[in-house]
Amino acid sequence: MTREVRRRSSSRDLALVAMFAGIITALGIVPAVTPPGLAVPVTAQSVGVMLAGAVLGARRGAMAVGLFLALVAVGLPLLAGGRGGLGVFATGSSGYLLAWPLAAALIGWLSGRAGAPYRLLSGAVVNVLGGIVVVYAGGVLGLVVLLDLSWWAALTPNVVYLPGDLVKAVVAALVARGVHAAYPGLLSPGRVGERRRARVS
């Protein structure tokens, strides 16, 4: 690959990372809802996390989410409800937030291994594994450490969030399928395959 092609690829990657960080930010416009008696709000931004992984792949998806969280950490009020600053990472919901880059990375990695074309069913399952299992695991750990809850007390409230998060996983898969149909080759493994074929030809 020539230096010029690498430079274009890097510029494209940075643009996609910034764009998806912006998408997660835009989803914060949807008001957060905190169920009575619970510490963790329901937001639409977790859809953006799933989409970042499902559309961009593991590396760029995690970078997009990491960029978003870095902007939150420096004080920008980008989380739903206008929250921002280092203080949000010391609240009961911080474990969920810190698990977001891991979730995007796992979703991206599994989506890339699933191959093209992007399929709705497998995409939804992957979103559940990353966007629900991984995020809930991080959230439960945060509740145990920061709020001194028992493992059971930290785990059981997630039942309230599960139906909505399952819907989000399907919605993210639907959107990702449309994006990949319109712009094939966005996932990293597909791009690597295209490069290899180009060398052979």
Image (cartoon, helix red, strand yellow):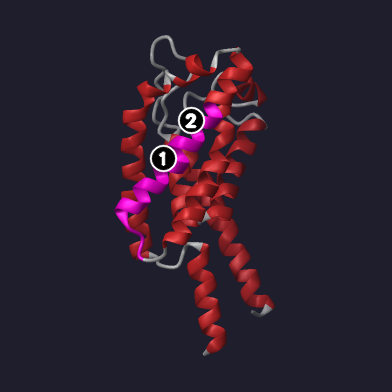
**Which numbered circle lies on residue 47?**
1
Q: Is residue 95 visible?
A: yes
Which is more N-terminal, label 1 or label 2? 1
Q: Residue furthest bottom?
A: 201
Residue lying at 64% horizontally and 20% vertically, measured from the top left: 90
On screen, residue 128 above or below 150: below
Q: Is residue 83 visible?
A: no
For label 1, the SS is: helix
**Which numbered circle lies on residue 136?**
2
Q: Is residue 176 magenta?
A: no
Residue range (magenta): 117-139
**Which numbered circle lies on residue 33?**
none
Residue lying at 57% horizontally and 85% vertically, measured from the top left: 199
Labelled pair 2, 1 in contact (Cβ < 8 Å): no
Q: Is residue 124 magenta?
A: yes
The amino acid at mark 1 is Val
